Amino acid sequence: MARFWQRPDLIQQLLPNVDLAEVEQLREQADKKLQIEKFQAMEKAVADLPQASDLKKPLNIDLSGPSIKFGNANDLTQKQQDLLSTAIDALSPWRKGPFCVFDREIDAEWKSNLKWDRIAPALGELRGRQILDLGCGNGYYMFRAAADKPKAVLGLDPSIQFYYVFEMMQRFLQLPNLQYERFGLEHLYVFDQAFDIAMCMGVLYHHRSPIEILRNLRQTIRVGGFAIIESQSIDGKGSTALFPEARYAKARNVFFVPTKDCLVNWVKRSGFKNVEVVSHTKVTIDEQRSTKDMTWESLPDFLDPNDSNLTIEGYPAPFRTVVRGQRMYL
């Protein structure tokens, strides 16, 4: 666990509810992918950055606002500022945010603070909790959770780009209760009743078997704990799901896009109890759009130019639905 800064292995805190031998094997497999040439520039950019102990004074850190914010420009030398700019460029496009790093505003494609505002009331008290963030992206929600002093937040996501963004932030923040593992949803089996809370956001619709994912997610939660499940969805009555012919909002890796009622039924039939809808909100160009730090196509390009209630393919435009479900028995 010492790739970019010295820290304890958070997985040790989850014992005996973790198959540690299997974790080590999965780490070895994941590390092999870091050797791919296109990721070497990211590795170097993060490794070249100063870390907390190299700076003139302790950082001002604010994890409670919309932007993950730390440091001031005058905390860095000019050389260190140049290294920071190199890292930010190397890690683009920026998908989740916002971040403000040493007064450098990073304007990500998604205003992830809007989603956090929707899920936070359902999360409740986080102090002392052990939390799983499945499909954690670059760790934005992990950092937001850290403001409430959880015991541990473990993020799982196989994306190497997102991993390096997280490690760039941790190079400076060095929060010992946050850890990123480059595991996928297929690796949930190594965690058995290890968490008080599991977050699964922006995952289900990318996979062919949403019920299987939810059942495996439930197994990672202790009896009495709960899950926050967030998915792209469509508006409409009844328990139905859209299955795109080829693409949905230009994305090829979208399989089932449920209505609100359908998502609730998925969660119930996966064994969760006390299931409730937390929010059901249409995605707008205020929440998802191209920016200076993510110049690729975004939501305005994915919608019908003549009718924002439809995707470019003619399907119902995307909503986001958040559901909370509890694990009540083994």
Image: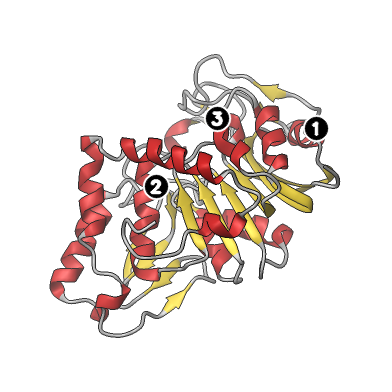
Disc 3 element: helix
For label 1, the residue is 265
Q: Position of residue 171 (x, y in %)?
A: 33, 65
Q: How far, Cα to Cα, is label 3 from label 1?
A: 18 Å
Q: Which mark is residue 162?
A: 2
Q: Does residue 92 lie above or below 128 as drawn?
A: above
Depth order, front residue of 64/282: 64
Residue 269 appears left or right of 59: right
Disc 1 element: helix
Q: Does residue 160 lie above or below 236 as drawn?
A: below
Q: Mark 2 is on which residue type?
A: Phe
Q: How far, Cα to Cα, is label 1 from label 2?
A: 31 Å
For label 3, the residue is 206
Depth order, front residue of 171/139: 171
Residue 300 appears left or right of 13: left
Q: Mark 3 is on which residue type?
A: His
**Residue drawn at (42%, 39%) of the image:** 298
Going from N to C along the chain, the mark reached first, 2 or 3, is: 2
**Residue drawn at (40%, 53%) of the image:** 108
